[in-house]
Image (cartoon, rainbow, N blue to C red):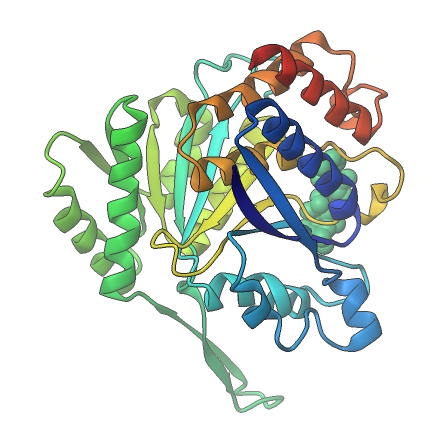
Amino acid sequence: MKTLKIAVIPGDGIGNEVTAEGVKVLDAFAAIKGNIQFEYTYFPWGCEYYLKTGNMMDVDGIEVLKGFDAILLGAVGYPSVADHISLHGLLLKIRQEFNQYINLRPIKLLPGAPCPLKDKGPEDIDFVVIRENVEGEYSGVGGIRFPDRPEETAIQTAVFTRKNTEKVMDYAFKVAQKRNKFNKVTNVTKSNALNYSMVFWDKIFKEIAANYPEIATETNHVDAVSMYFLQRPESFDVLVASNLFGDIITDLGAALQGGLGFAASANLNLEKEFPSMFEPVHGSAPDIKDKGMANPIAMVWTVKMMLDFLLEDEDTEAIIEAITQVLLEGKSLTPDLKGSAKTHEVGDAICEKLKGLL
Ligand code: ATP
Ligand code: MG
């Protein structure tokens, strides 16, 4: 029996509700497999914790989390807590302290999920974005000169290191190899305007590409990529993008795959020196909190990604299949999908389908 220690941070708002469904699916998967079990430790961190204690997480939080195999995060955010406090106090802190330099975002339209592009279907929308996750435009380097004077000037510097950029690019090529779809990596750049950072980015891309002669490459500016997402999403396989550009295009991708209810993500430290963190892309959605209206599919997809990282087990595909069956059946869907089921009923339905698949 293999035991995996999971640190669970349900966070705020609908984070709690969707996390419960993710854990339910993990347990269902473990029960069916019989050879793994999950040991959960819950941490009450987040914005509500901040309002009580003045900290988003415990001061020794990072030390404590080091002992886990993975971190499962629900959502962090609260109307009265500024985004930069919640982001820097927890999410970005964990990403950076644990050097989770890869953000992995599958963009896949499942059969039965709503797509805003009327002439595109599940066969057209199936790609992966690899986003650089610890540096680039989000490095936090900069400052304000001459504050509150007419000359006031804000400076925000992007930082790209060779070491990190190489690792991100290399992972993109490895993912393309593994997917074996078109064996293609698209480099998302803006080197026509960003004459240091993105010219460097393109140079590293070319160097790494040379190690993978069997993988085709294309390089497109981020503005063009945004347009191609809508015009020809079927042309993509794997994309590699900087922190800022990846952030933006993956939200566009979320829309293509049916909205925030479907967007799952992984923050990976590939070397496993530290735990990796798995979270749905959506926030705490205070407007629907505690109403049982939250769609748990993004979280269920997220735990599937966690399993993929922790285990080498092709049976995890059954989780996506179970979600698809629930979507196609149409009986257990939350209001965002025009259904009337509660969050926990969707989780139950997915577990039920999973049992029939494995
Ligand atoms: P935060 O400040 O934590 O980012 P937010 O108000 O930006 O929260 P998001 O969760 O990012 O909210 O999503 C915006 C809106 O999309 C929500 O207000 C909600 O109506 C909807 N939404 C997001 N996630 C879900 C979900 N899992 N199920 C149903 N609706 C969702
Ligand atoms: Mg938000």
How many marks overall? 0
What residue do we see at 54% from left, 46% from top? 4
Q: Quadrant of the C terminus?
A: top right
**Side of 287 relative to 254 (left or right):** right
**Side of 144 relative to 61 (left or right):** left
In depth, the one of 55 and 309 nearer the eye is 309
Q: Is residue 71 above or below residue 109?
A: below
**Side of 271 relative to 99 (left or right):** left
Q: Quadrant of residue 44?
A: bottom right
Percent coordinates x, y for residue 229 in the rendering: 43, 30
What residue do we see at 70% from left, 8% from top? 329
What residue do we see at 82% from left, 71% from top? 51
Which residue extends farthest right? 291
Q: Is residue 163 above or below residue 239?
A: below
Q: Is residue 191 visible?
A: no
**Side of 156 relative to 288 (left or right):** left
What residue do we see at 59% from left, 90% from top? 149
Q: Quadrant of residue 62?
A: bottom right
